[in-house]
Image: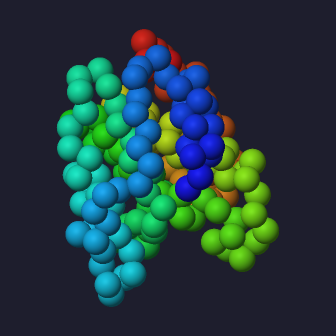
Amino acid sequence: MADEMMEELRDRVGGIFHCPTEIKAGFSDLAQAYDSQRKQYLSSKLLASLGESEREERVVGIADVDIYVPRLNFVFGEADIVSGTAIVSLCRLRQEYYGLALDEALFLERATKEIVHELGHTFGLEHCSNNKCVMHFSNSLADTDLKEASFCPKCRPKIMPMI
Ligand SMILES: [Zn+2]
Ligand SMILES: [Zn+2]
């Protein structure tokens, strides 16, 4: 992914959280997580390769490949509350993935929402039933497009010092 896009994502996410967050582009060892039958990458293995974040700090790895967890066809991302790390896949956030014309603005909005969502998990938030809330579970891209990049009035107080 282009450097300017990564910078844009860092700006957007940095404007939401009052917590040092490192957003890393790509993974150094993708091959160890590849499943040749599924032609996808095991999310938890990539997540584990990020190691532990410093206390009070968060790390999000951005994958440009399709990721999965067992029993699900794919995931947009995954978070680990213990290590304070998360992974987000850009693969299915692109219009081109569905044979549609590139839409950079929409892509950036989607990526921001998914990063904020996974960061919310690292702060202990669970899924929210409010479909406008960033913590709503995205079963499909339509869910991602419907929700906003912000926390609803119920979730917000729970992570108040962080946002
Ligand atoms: Zn989630
Ligand atoms: Zn909520």
**Image location of residue 69, percent across then percent down:** 33, 65
Tell me the residue at 54%/64% (across/down): 91
Can you tell which quarter of the image residue 37 is in? bottom left
Q: Quadrant of the N terminus?
A: bottom right
**Image location of residue 19, percent across then percent down:** 41, 20
Of residues 102 and 42, the one drawn nearer to the viewer in this rendering: 102
Tell me the residue at 40%/23% (across/down): 20
Q: Residue furthest front?
A: 3
Of residues 72 and 18, the one drawn nearer to the viewer in this rendering: 18
Up-down: is 91 above or below 57? Answer: below
Left-right relation of 32 to 24: left
Q: Is residue 11 visible?
A: yes
Q: Residue furthest top?
A: 161
Tell me the residue at 35%/56% (across/down): 27
Up-down: is 67 above or below 118? Answer: below
Of residues 126 and 15, the one drawn nearer to the viewer in this rendering: 15
Up-down: is 114 above or below 101? Answer: above
